[in-house]
Amino acid sequence: MLLLNPGPVTLTERVRRSLLQPDLCHRESEFFDLQDEARERLLATYTLDPAIWTAVLLTGSGTAAVESMVAALVPDAGRLLIVENGVYGERIAHMCAQYRIAHERVVGSWMQAPDLEVIAARLDATGPEGRFTHLAVVHHETTTGRLNDLKPLGELCRAHGTSLLVDGVSSFGAEALDFSDDSLSAVAATANKCLHGVPGAAFVIVRRAALAQAASRTYYLDLGRLARLQDQRNTPFTPAVHAYYGLVEALREFAEQGGRLTRYRQYGSLAEQVRAGLAALGIEAAVPPEQSSVVLRAYRLPAGLTYTNLHDGLKAEGFVIYAGQGDLSKTLFRISTMGDLSSADIDRLVKCCAKLR
């Protein structure tokens, strides 16, 4: 079965075999060697200086990494402005409500890019609660496949002395991330998307300077404590050891294949092959390609074809696709090109869609 959903992904045999390595106690030096390698290779993905940045590993999904990032890096007296144009921006707002973090939301259409004028106006407005100390945004909003442009948001943050927190769960390892932007404090991500690892290992790439001021609102997801102990070759809890095996092997494979740019080009080629193939069948992209991520794109269901019929028909042929979210489930479906996929796989997918069309 080939997974065309936005994670987990179809694994390479090499990563799958890595899960069969010997059982390993997480208090032994061999585990800390594994943990160290994972952290070093995560930083190397974007050629980051370990004196400035650190990779903090967590056991959990990408949502755990986002929650850990938000709960730690917005201080008790801080205020967070959340940019929302999809489900995952909305999820950050729910996290803030859960932790009683002072926040406001800039809620836009799920089918549109964030409104920079509205965001700027909100950053300019200093009410009784004070200024916004942080801004959070989802880089690749997989609700629609839109890639939110971080550059103008970074410019706004620098102009207002605001720190940028990025949900990079579905973009890290493929799309460009400008870690040289002084406003960027952290990026949360996971093993089981663009890195082609398995579910269970997530991480936050965070500036050490931001960690030094981290709050401690949560116990298991306490980013500051995790970072301190990992720097000491330690861990506070039992991690998903075999998921770490898978992450390290996936990162080794990632580097050997040429790193981020190679993966970006591979995804881009496959995504364009999907788009062109479906366009020939009269199936339109929901978001223009130049505004979409290469990782996943959304398409409009053609008249007379329900998502259930499309999903079930493709699953019978060995493909798993994903529905739209919320009200978009009635009009959209989504196809990701992450994982161990080839051009021949996409050719077969398009032919299967033609039969169902």
Image: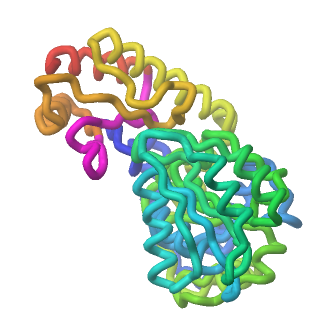
Seen from the viewer's position, the closer of residues 317 and 301 is: 301
* Residue 157 in the image, given as x and y percentages of width and height: 76, 58
Is residue 85 toward the left or the right of residue 161 in the image? left
Bounds of the magenta span? 322-342
| Residue 227 percent location from the top left of the image | 70, 78
Which residue is rendered at x = 72% and y = 73% of the image?
Answer: 126
Residue 184 position by quadrant: bottom right
Say which residue appears at 16% left-offset and 23% top-offset: 303
Looking at the picture, tell me which residue is in the foreground, 227 or 322.
Answer: 322
Q: Residue at x 78, y 74 (%)?
A: 210
Q: Is residue 3 left or right of residue 220?
A: left
Q: Quadrant of the N terminus?
A: top left
Q: Is residue 69 visible?
A: yes
Colour scheme in use: rainbow
Q: Nearer the viewer, residue 179 or 267?
A: 179
Does residue 310 sit above or below 89 in this rendering?
above
Q: Quadrant of residue 20?
A: bottom left
Q: Residue at x 51, y 65 (%)?
A: 201
Q: Is residue 242 visible?
A: no
Does 287 appear above or below 215? above
Residue 45 position within the rendered picture, expressed as x and y whole percent measured from the top left: 71, 48
Q: How many numbered circles does the render carry?
A: 0
Residue 230 in magenta stretch: no
Q: What residue occupies the far top of the structure in this picture?
A: 280
In this view, 345 is above or below 32: above
Q: Position of residue 221 (x, y in %)?
A: 55, 81
Split into 4 quadrants, where in the image is the C terminus? Answer: top left
